[in-house]
């Protein structure tokens, strides 16, 4: 268990609005029913993303739970009858970089195109010259046509 500062995750920081704050994590090792080593990972917290619509800050809550099976080689892991064939596997190593693994899991848990809920984005109200600007390119074309 522990707390990891967002500022300590440089690859993740590139995707964030700002890297203030932290995430909490818990990692538990266990053996699967087939005797393979595995990790149960839980990550909670909140990150600040940039909204794709308005480019403003978007608070995004993290509630991630993953199970990863550790294998020496990807060819070694063969799902058994009745077992989910979408089991996540990672290569086993004598020394696991937990911080890098957690950073990857957080990155995988982020939305591809973060956006505020409909109607929550702050669009520019008016131009500095007092004239209202269209929100989309299609609206701009419609205005030119008139």
Image: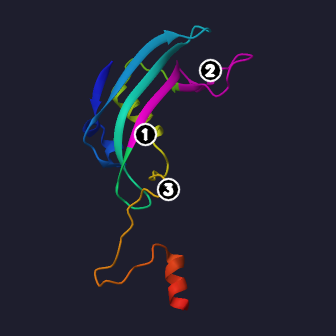
Q: Tell me if residue 88 is in the magenta stretch.
A: yes
Q: Tell me if residue 32 is in the magenta stretch.
A: no
The answer to the question of whether label 2 and label 3 lie on touching residues, with beta carbons closer than 8 A, is no
Q: Nearer the viewer, residue 93 or 25?
A: 25
Q: From the top left corner, tell me how far across and down residue 18 is, in percent.
A: 28, 48
Q: Residue at x 73, y 17 (%)?
A: 82
The residue to which callout 1 is attached is 107
Q: Which residues fall within the magenta stretch?
A: 60-89
The residue to which callout 2 is attached is 77
Q: From the top left corner, tell me how far across and down residue 57 is, in percent.
A: 33, 52
Quarter placement of the C terminus? bottom right
* Quarter of the rendering containing residue 23: top left
Badge 3 local density, few (<14 within 10 Å), some, or many (20+)?
few
Tell me: 54 left or right of 130.
Answer: right
Q: From the top left corner, tell me how far across and down residue 130 is, in percent.
A: 31, 83
Quarter placement of the N terminus? top left
Q: Residue at x 30, y 21 (%)?
A: 2
- Looking at the rendered structure, the secondary structure element under dot 3 is loop
Q: From the top left corner, tell me how far across and down residue 106 is, in percent.
A: 41, 35
Badge 1 local density, few (<14 within 10 Å), some, or many (20+)?
some
The residue to which callout 3 is attached is 118
- The alpha-carbon separation of the residues under discs 1 and 2 comes to 25 Å
The mark closer to the camera, 1 or 2, is: 1
């Amino acid at each position: 268990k522990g707390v990891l500062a967002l500022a300590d995750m440089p690859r993740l920081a590139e995707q964030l609005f700002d890297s203030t704050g932290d995430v909490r994590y818990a990692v538990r090792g266990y053996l699967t029913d087939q005797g393979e080593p595995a990790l149960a990972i839980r990550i909670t917290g909140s990150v600040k993303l940039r909204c794709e619509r308005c480019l403003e800050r978007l608070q995004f809550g993290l509630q991630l739970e993953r199970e990863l099976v550790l294998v020496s080689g990807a060819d070694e892991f063969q799902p058994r009858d009745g077992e989910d064939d979408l089991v996540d596997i990672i290569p086993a190593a004598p020394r696991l970089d937990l911080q890098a693994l957690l950073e990857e899991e957080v990155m995988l848990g982020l939305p591809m195109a973060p956006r505020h809920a409909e109607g929550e984005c702050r669009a520019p109200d008016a131009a500095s010259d007092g004239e209202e600007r269209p929100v989309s390119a299609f609206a701009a074309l419609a205005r030119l046509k008139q």
